[in-house]
Every structure is written in structure tokens, then in C-alpha cells.
Image: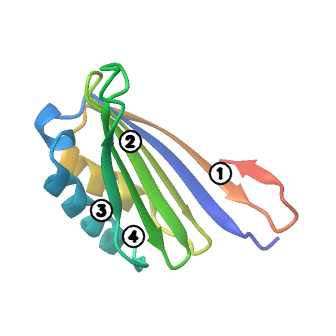
Amino acid sequence: METWGKLAVINLVDCIPETIKNEKHILAWGSYLIDAIDMKAYGEPFIKRFALHDPKVAGYTYFQAIETSHICAHFSEESNTTFVNIFSCKDYDVEQAINACHKFFGFKSYKIEVSTMMPNGDILQK
């Protein structure tokens, strides 16, 4: 059966703190990731440091539209955890995405869920 898209939810645990607190570093990661998974950026990325009133959730949020959907991430500074979501109607190599994240954030471990979206709306877990 033909698929419609893929969603990878990647949680990076114990990232190097300096890497997730640096806006320029995060933007460089975004560009590198887009190339690594063979996507094309659509417009400029959005990046903003949010929730400064609550250290438990404070950190940068990144969003980049791509021609086939989007990449978004939130960088939790207190826990040194990064939450990455990649959705695309074009297939991509999830391992390349993980490698790109490791190169930039040096995490110690990660958790991942990959789902396939079907034209009828069904979601298949891998």
C-alpha cells in the first residue's frame, strides 16, 4: 500500500548543555540536518527562546518548513533533553537524522518512534 508520509519523533537525552543553549549552533544543526536527510528548506527557520519564567521547560524552539512538510524541535535546557519531530511526505533516512543530531548535540542516548501516515488517515507504528 502506498504511504503518504513519515513522522520521526526523536528524543535526545543528556545533550551537551552548551550545544542546546546556542542559537547559532541550533541554526547550523538545522541546515546540516536538512542536507543530511535530503530535504529542501522552504523560507527561513523560526527560532525563539521560550518559557523563561519556568526553568523546567525553558529553552529554544526551532521550526523549519521544508518543501514536503516540516522539522521542529524544542531544547529543554534544565534537563539537557531535545525533542525533535520530522514530518515529510518524502521518505528520508531516520539514521541520518539521528547521526546529524549526535554530531551537533552529543547526546548520550535517544528514544525514537517512527510512524507512517497512510492516505486513508491511518497511522502505522514501526
Q: Is residue 40 above or below residue 91?
A: below
Please rate how many residues cluster around mark 1, counting C-alpha atoms within 10 Å: few if below 14, some from 14 to 19, many from 20: some
Tell me the residue that label 1 is attached to: 115
Mark 3 or mark 2: name the one nearer the start of the chain: 3
The part of the image, by quadrant, that contains residue 34 is bottom left
Q: Which percent across, then down, holds residue 59? A: 30, 35
Q: CA distance from mark 4 to mark 2?
A: 19 Å
The part of the image, by quadrant, that contains residue 71 is bottom left
Describe residue 107's horizontal placement relative to residue 117 as left or right: left
Q: Is residue 48 above or below residue 31?
A: above
Please rate how many residues cluster around mark 4, counting C-alpha atoms within 10 Å: few if below 14, some from 14 to 19, many from 20: some
- Which mark lies nearer to you, 1 or 3? 3
Residue 37, disc: 4
Q: CA distance from mark 4 to mark 3?
A: 11 Å
Please rate how many residues cluster around mark 2, counting C-alpha atoms within 10 Å: few if below 14, some from 14 to 19, many from 20: many
Q: What type is the residue that disc 4 sits on?
A: Ile
Tell me the residue that label 2 is attached to: 74
Tell me the residue that label 3 is attached to: 30
Q: Quadrant of the N terminus?
A: bottom right
Mark 4 or mark 1: name the one nearer the start of the chain: 4
Q: What type is the residue that disc 1 sits on?
A: Ser
Q: Are discs 4 and 2 less than 8 Å apart at CB?
A: no
Q: CA distance from mark 4 to mark 1?
A: 17 Å
Q: What type is the residue that disc 3 sits on?
A: Gly
- Which mark lies nearer to you, 4 or 3? 3
- Which mark lies nearer to you, 4 or 2? 2
* Residue at left offset 35%, top offset 51%: 98
Q: Are discs 1 and 3 less than 8 Å apart at CB?
A: no
Q: Which percent across, then down, holds residue 57? A: 37, 26
